[in-house]
Image (cartoon, rainbow, N blue to C red):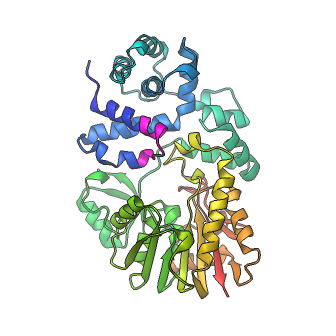
């Protein structure tokens, strides 16, 4: 029996996610899917993201049904089983025999023929039913971790930091496909998209945000175009907090969403976008093609500049725990000890970024993390001994954006944590972001 192109592509992508430091969303938008039909592309995305979202639930089922100890399963066998079990438990439109037979064929394709009998036996034991986390008898942290497929250590720290109700909202949000959100430059962009069959709904936070509710976005010729871009509303809000500037530095710019948003908002500004890795700098040039952006392949810790920028953005590399709905593999790779390693790097980048701010200028520090080690603690460390900088309360800036009509979210209090911006997935319909505004005397 031949393996369908969609399932084979999903298998190969999931193996790369496990073996490499690869993000599924990037692989799903790569040349790996160029030869597939739109229907097959959608199935690949459904399988890959579904397996990653529900991996621990799938593994519980596999461990229960397998006569071979779970830890002894080869990665190829485990990956094929995850794909097969996901289809049986979550995709009611996939015939049971197809999920069984193609899962067996996947392990044969991977030259794990000796495991074919095991895979066939496991797949035939799995019941075809729509998985319902609410059917679980677990409560509290155990429910959020086991039934909603999140690492227990992560759930426990969120409950402590954000309370159980917010943690439940986060976990539930992470387990659903978030809508694709676009950033437009104006009403004319919406008309152009409508002509290509893209149906849009108004954004919840930002005036120029639109949620895609219909049409084949991958087929449009308008992306990437600078003025129209795929960008989460929380990310758009962080860019808007930069305000107005004439000379702007984006220290860690790739993949370019905030850089492009700044170039669109401030067409007269000169923007320098720095990125350490050459391949990501190339991606940045593609996704942020505006003429007023200069891309520089360089380390944010040692840029060839003095304090000459009136606006600096330090959107630092982080754990990404605010983006698990879009990047579910993060929750299975991240370890508690990683947070302090990331914090050390973030402190170094922010301290370097502070050197590039002109007197009277401002710096926005941001992450897509929910963790205090990467957020408030970094700001506290970097402000110690930095007497020429002060923290600007974000509430005033949000009020300014609201008054201008750029921010359409009504409840500013929900976006504020102490003096900082904080969006929480499930509380707001966007990824989780943190931002702080620093001003140089």
Q: Nearer the viewer, residue 292 or 428?
A: 292
Residue 240 among those drawn in magenta: no
Q: Quadrant of residue 272?
A: bottom left
Q: What stretch is highlighted in magenta?
A: 15-25
Q: Where is residue 142 in the image (x, y as percent from the top left)?
A: 70, 33
Residue 22 among those drawn in magenta: yes
Q: Position of residue 123 (x, y in %)?
A: 45, 16
Q: In this view, does 67 lie above or below 418?
A: above
Is residue 426 visible in the rendered image? The answer is: no
Q: Where is residue 390 in the image (x, y as percent from the top left)?
A: 71, 80
Q: Is residue 63 left or right of residue 16?
A: right
The majority secondary structure of the magenta stretch comes to helix
Q: Is residue 83 left or right of residue 137?
A: left
Q: At 41% from the left edge and 70% from the top edge, which residue is drawn? A: 260
Q: Is residue 8 above or below residue 299?
A: above
Q: At 71% from the left edge and 32% from the top edge, which residue is drawn? A: 139
Is residue 190 visible in the rendered image? The answer is: yes
Q: In this view, does 367 lie above or below 178?
A: below
């Amino acid at each position: 029996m031949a393996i369908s192109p969609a399932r084979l592509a999903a298998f190969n992508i999931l193996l790369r996610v496990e073996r490499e430091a690869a993000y599924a969303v990037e692989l799903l938008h790569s040349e790996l899917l160029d030869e597939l039909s739109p229907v097959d592309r959608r199935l690949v995305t459904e399988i890959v993201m579904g397996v990653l979202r529900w991996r621990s639930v799938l593994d519980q089922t596999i461990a229960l049904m397998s006569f071979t100890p779970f830890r002894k399963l080869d990665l190829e066998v485990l990956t094929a089983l995850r794909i097969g079990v996901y289809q049986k438990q979550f995709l009611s439109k996939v015939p049971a025999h197809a999920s069984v037979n193609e899962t067996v064929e996947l392990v044969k394709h991977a030259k794990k023929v000796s495991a074919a009998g095991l895979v066939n036996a496991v797949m035939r034991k799995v019941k075809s039913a729509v998985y319902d986390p609410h059917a679980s008898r677990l409560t509290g942290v155990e429910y959020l971790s086991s039934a909603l497929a999140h690492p227990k250590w992560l759930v426990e720290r969120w409950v402590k930091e954000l309370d159980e109700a917010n943690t439940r909202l986060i976990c539930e949000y992470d387990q659903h496909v978030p809508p694709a959100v676009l950033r437009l430059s104006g009403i004319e962009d919406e008309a152009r998209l409508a002509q290509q069959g893209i149906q849009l709904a108004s954004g919840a936070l930002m005036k120029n945000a639109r949620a895609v509710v219909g049409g084949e976005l991958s087929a449009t010729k308008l992306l990437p175009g600078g003025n129209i871009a795929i960008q989460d509303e929380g990310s758009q809000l962080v860019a808007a907090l930069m305000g107005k500037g004439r000379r702007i530095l984006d220290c860690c710019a790739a993949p370019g969403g905030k850089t492009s948003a700044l170039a669109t908002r401030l067409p007269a500004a000169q923007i320098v976008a720095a990125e350490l890795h050459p391949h990501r700098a190339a991606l940045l040039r593609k996704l942020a093609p505006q003429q007023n952006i200069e891309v520089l392949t360089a380390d944010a810790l040692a840029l060839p500049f003095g304090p000459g920028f009136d606006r600096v953005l330090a959107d630092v590399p982080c754990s990404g725990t605010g983006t698990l709905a879009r990047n579910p593999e993060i929750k299975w790779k991240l370890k508690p000890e990683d947070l302090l390693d990331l914090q050390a790097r973030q402190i170094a980048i922010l301290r370097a970024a502070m050197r590039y701010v002109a007197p009277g200028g401002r710096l926005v520090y941001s992450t897509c993390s929910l963790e205090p080690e990467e957020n408030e603690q970094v700001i506290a460390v970097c402000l110690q001994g930095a007497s020429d900088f002060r923290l600007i309360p974000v509430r005033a800036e949000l009020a300014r954006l609201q008054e201008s009509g750029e921010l359409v979210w009504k409840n500013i209090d929900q976006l504020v944590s102490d003096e900082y911006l904080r969006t929480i997935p499930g509380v707001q319909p966007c990824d989780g972001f943190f931002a702080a505004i620093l001003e140089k005397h």
